[in-house]
Image (cartoon, helix red, strand yellow):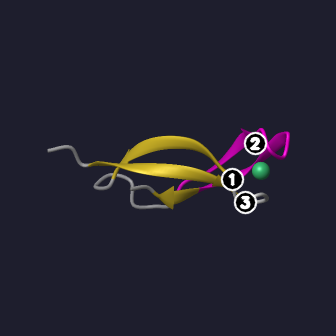
């Protein structure tokens, strides 16, 4: 019933997955990139959407 799919946000520097979210496949086609705090890099880095499962 839900069109939302789970996505993960992966730090582009260390490749750790730091955040989880959901997005609506129908309304959000673009890949999401966010500037978020990475506790592994200990600073804000670019996080990129990965397909969740
Ligand atoms: Zn990182």
Residue occupying image coordinates x 21% and y 43% = 2
Residue named by callout 2: 38
The C terminus, quarter of image: bottom left
Calculate the distance from the C-alpha at mark 1 to the C-alpha at mark 3. Answer: 8 Å
Q: Is mark 3 within 8 Å of ligand 1?
A: yes
Query: Image height check: is 13 above or below 21?
Result: below
Closer to viewer: mark 1 or mark 3:
1
- How many numbered dots are placed on residues in this image? 3
Disc 2 and disc 1 in contact, CB within 8 angstroms: yes
Q: CA distance from mark 2 to mark 1?
A: 8 Å
Task: Describe the element under mark 2 as helix, strand or loop.
Answer: strand
Q: Which mark is residue 35?
A: none
* Label 1 residue near ligand 1, CB within 8 Å: yes
Secondary element at tag 1: loop
> Where, quadrant-wise, is the N terminus in this rendering?
top left
* Classed neighbour count for the residue bearing mark 3: other residues with Cα under 10 Å, few (<14), some (14–19), many (≥20): some
- The answer to whether the beta carbon of the residue marked 2 is less than 8 Å from any atom of ligand 1 is yes
In the rendering, at what x and y percent does residue 11 appear?
70, 54
Q: Which mark is residue 16?
A: 1
Residue 12 to residue 19: above or below: below
Is residue 49 toward the left or the right of residue 23 in the image? right
Q: Which residue position holds label 3?
A: 12
Q: Which class describes the residues within 10 Å of circle 2: few (<14), some (14-19), or many (20+)?
A: many
Q: Quadrant of residue 39?
A: top right
Disc 2 or 1, which lies upstream in sequence?
1
In this picture, which residue range is highlighted in magenta? 32-48
């Amino acid at each position: 019933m839900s069109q939302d799919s789970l996505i993960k946000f992966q730090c582009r520097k260390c490749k750790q997955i730091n955040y989880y979210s959901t997005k609506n496949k129908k309304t959000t086609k673009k890949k999401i990139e966010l500037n978020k705090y990475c506790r592994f890099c200990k600073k804000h880095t670019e996080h990129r959407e990965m397909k969740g499962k």
